[in-house]
Amino acid sequence: MQRIQAFKFELMPHGKQTRDLRRFAGSCRFVYNQALAMQKARYAAGEKTLGYAECCKVMATWKADPATLWLRETPSQALQQSLKDLERAYINFFEGRAAFPSFKRKGKSSDSFRYPQGYRLDQANSRLFLPKLGWLRYRKSREVLGTVKNVTVSQCGGTWFAAIQTEREVDVPVHQGGAVGIDMGIVRFATLSDGTVFEPLNSFKRLEETLAKAQRTMNRKTRFGKNWKKAKARVQRIHIKIANARRDALNKTSTTISKNHAMVCIEDLQVANMTASAAGTMAAPGTNVRAKSGLNKAILDQGWGEFRRQLEYKTAWNGGHLIAVPPQNTSRTCPRCGHVAKENRQTQARFACVDCGYEDNADLVGAINVLRAGHARLACEVSGAVRPTAAGTHRSDSA
């Protein structure tokens, strides 16, 4: 089995290298924005958009223009990769996977550029060679395995990182674990069908007041002044701390689940729809806007989308299988008799079937139903039949 994996390390550049990193990232951002503006202008004029090769030819004229001669100082391959990113953004838009490409703003998007070749990795001395930058030391936290395919340099909160993407052949793993269903929540981050509970970290909630205070301090400073930049850097550090804590918790939880279970069943939650604003419009204002806003904030603080992404590749790496099932009625279906009713969910935490009297924790019931729905879907995929749309415990006579 071929495994493509990225190893990310913090770089330790000296002063000149740091300035070059900023200049290279800025040049790549400029080329991306110029190419996007050119493509939009051609479309408005009724002309055909240019492909990657044609864009590279146009970029050569920019590098020869006296006004943009500074583009020559940036490695050509990094500039070309920016054009590849734009082409990929257009493809994702036309295939319905992403929104229309937007311009990159300085300070708003992560500064990054990529080297597809010309790099050299010296793991023995914890250093990395990059064209026009020289040797850069990095904080070695683990060994890089496989053949290096490309290196992406990015900046986050004033710190530069190198993501080294590798490719290698590994033996196809055979998982010995069983199957489990997962019910996602806010009070309980994840409840497994075997009764295991993972508590939420709520990293944003823990630092929300600290972040709000830092933001108020920044707003009182003169914009773009020296003190404003210091205050902004503090806000960025808090955001990074929140994101790192959340990412660490998600990695630990997803690793534990993927290693111990061969089949993981999870709800196919549409997080973007679930966290849509309830404000409405001037003509039709929404209701319970404050309560919905608080719910949206709590959902986003859990990181459900990132958790599913990590589970998906980690189960595959460990020889397991991830199954996403429809979330409808998973918390309203009785796992004993199959009765589906809104009244079965007595409270947020308690499930009591109005038909047979079965009682248990609502999150555990949801996880059990998710597991059964996963088994039903897997059976339908094997047999070629249409999978059921219910919670996987019962199918009505009309189904």
Image: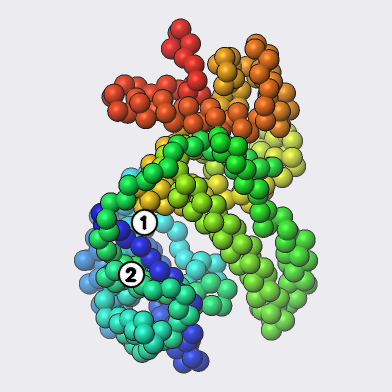
Q: Are marks 2 and 1 in contact (CB under 8 Å)?
A: no
Question: For this view, does 217 lie left or right of residue 79?
Answer: right
- Specify the quadrant of the image occupied by residue 288: top right
- Specify the quadrant of the image occupied by residue 217: bottom right
Identify the residue at the far front of this view. Answer: 176
Q: Considering the image in quadrants, where does the C terminus appear?
A: top left
Q: Earlier in the sequence, mark 2 or mark 1?
A: 1
Q: Check disc 2 and report its element: helix, strand or loop.
A: loop
| Residue positioned 47% across, 75% down in the render | 141
Horizontal and vertical percent position of residue 73: 35, 87
Question: For this view, does 125 lie left or right of residue 331?
Answer: left
Residue designated by label 2: 145
Up/down of 170 relative to 219, above or below: above
Horizontal and vertical percent position of residue 101: 41, 56
| Of the pair 265 and 103, the residue shown nearer to us | 265
Q: Mark 1 belongs to which amino acid?
A: Ala
Give the CA distance from mark 2 to mark 1: 29 Å
Horizontal and vertical percent position of residue 306: 51, 51
The count of marks equals 2
Query: For mark 1, does the 10 Å Cα neighbourhood hold few (<14), some (14 to 19), or many (20 or more) residues?
Result: some
- Disc on res. 349: none
